[in-house]
Image (cartoon, rainbow, N blue to C red):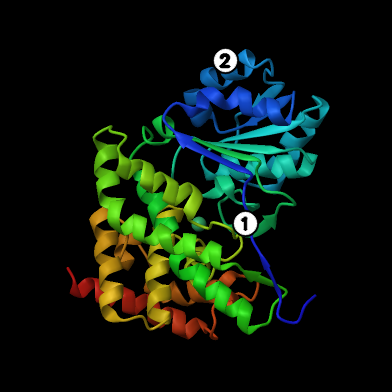
Amino acid sequence: MPESGARKIILPSKYVQGPGVLNQLGTFVKQYGERPYAVSGRTSFSKVRARIQSSLLAAGVPLAGFDDSVTESTKAKIEAIASKAEELDVDLIVACGGGKAVDTGKGVGERLHVPIISVPTQCATNADGMADVVIFSEDHKFIEDLYLSRPPVLVLVDTEVVARAPPQYIVQGMGDALACAFEKPAYAATQRAKKAGELATNAALEVNMRCFSTLMTHGLQAKKDVEAGKITESVEAVVEAIKLQSGFGFGGGGCAAAHAIHNGFTMIPGIRRKHGEIVAFGTLVQMVLEKRPMGEIERVVRWCRSLGLPTRLADLGTVDRRRLHEVAEKACDPNDSMTSMPFPVSPMMVVEAIEEVDRLAGLMD
Ligand SMILES: [Zn+2]
């Protein structure tokens, strides 16, 4: 390994986004396999099943089978579906739905060593293009990140499908995507300082920063347009920001404080917000840890508020402040992504930064 490390970028082979592109699924599947198997959640699959089946049938590659029972991305579920699919001699996985179903599908594809095509049905996460699987326990506690040997061969984002999902999904997706403009540079700086074997490329960093400016410019408009049932340029721009630009080139790695703080909050009861919403709050905490200029923090707090993303502890749910040290301890777990911050972060610093975000946002009420 060279002393200064090697630059590395991990990307899905193809990314296709637009209204109606789901109808092209069969044509794409045919390029990679003959016996596709779909992994999904029940509600999401019911929305796209007919179109998936007819597109695959028209291309002469009908579904070899499907499992639409995913409710959580667990090791046991991946194993159970993989065993079923293996018996059917499956040679491609269509990972379809929200983050958990797509992650489960990717896990099945990895286990069977077959290509993966992601077909998101909503915009709450960027799991689709990532080369990792986030594993949870049955009661939705974060366990670990599994890295795939190869990323999905295609991410097929039909904007007619994702933009017609309930509007809170695109807001959650924006909250998750917000983190990348802060976590990726932190991670990259840490890797450089450590002279790590793998370094981020400038290309990946540029795209992650572009994601941030897209969110700031188009975020609120996209939310309004989705609420009005319209697919506009702002909606397309934000969907691309979430699904392609956020996390671009990192393959699932590259998280830092924002996601570590999210993982910390999953440890305590009373949190009512979803992944992307908690990550948005975690991003504000990371900004405070980094001692960013007040004007910059205020801008992001205002943006979060305009979208309905949490900026105060009370927005997250009923949080017992006496348990914030548990959040902070978990966030600073040496196996979590806090270690990707370019300076040491103690649990005490995390508790103080959480309280500082809450205080600053309170001043803006
Ligand atoms: Zn995330």
Residue drawn 67% across the image and 48% down it: 151
Please report whichever mark, 1 or 2, sits nearer to the chain's N-terminal start.
2
- Left or right: residue 70 versus residue 158 is right
Mark 2 residue crowding within 10 angstroms, few (<14) / some (14–19) / many (20+): some
Q: Which residue is mark 2?
A: 54
Which quarter of the rendering shows the C terminus?
bottom left
Question: In terms of image quadrants, where is residue 272?
Answer: bottom left
Residue 245, position as x, y percentages in the image: 48, 54
Query: Which SS class for mark 1?
Result: loop
Image location (x, y in percent) of residue 364 = 18, 71
Closer-to-camera residue (309/322):
309
Closer to the camera, 28 or 49? Answer: 28
Question: Is residue 160 left or right of 222 when viewed as pictured?
Answer: right
The N terminus, quarter of image: bottom right
**What is the quadrant of residue 143 in the picture?**
bottom right
Depth check: 161 or 365 in front? 161
Mark 1 is surrounded, within 10 Å at the Cα level, by few (under 14), some (14 to 19) or many (20 or more) other residues, namely many
Callout 2, which amino acid? Ser
- Numbered tag placed on residue 202 in the rendering: none
Q: Is residue 325 above or below residue 253?
A: below
Q: Is residue 317 visible?
A: no
Q: Is residue 267 left or right of residue 296?
A: right
Q: Is residue 57 left or right of residue 113?
A: left
Q: Residue at x 53, y 85 (%)?
A: 343
State yes or no: Cβ of the residue under disc 2 lies below 8 Å from any atom of ligand 1. Answer: no
Q: Are marks 1 and 2 in contact (CB under 8 Å)?
A: no
Q: Residue furthest front?
A: 203
Residue type indicated by callout 1 = Gly
Task: Name the residue carrying label 1.
Answer: 251
**Quadrant of res 41:** top right
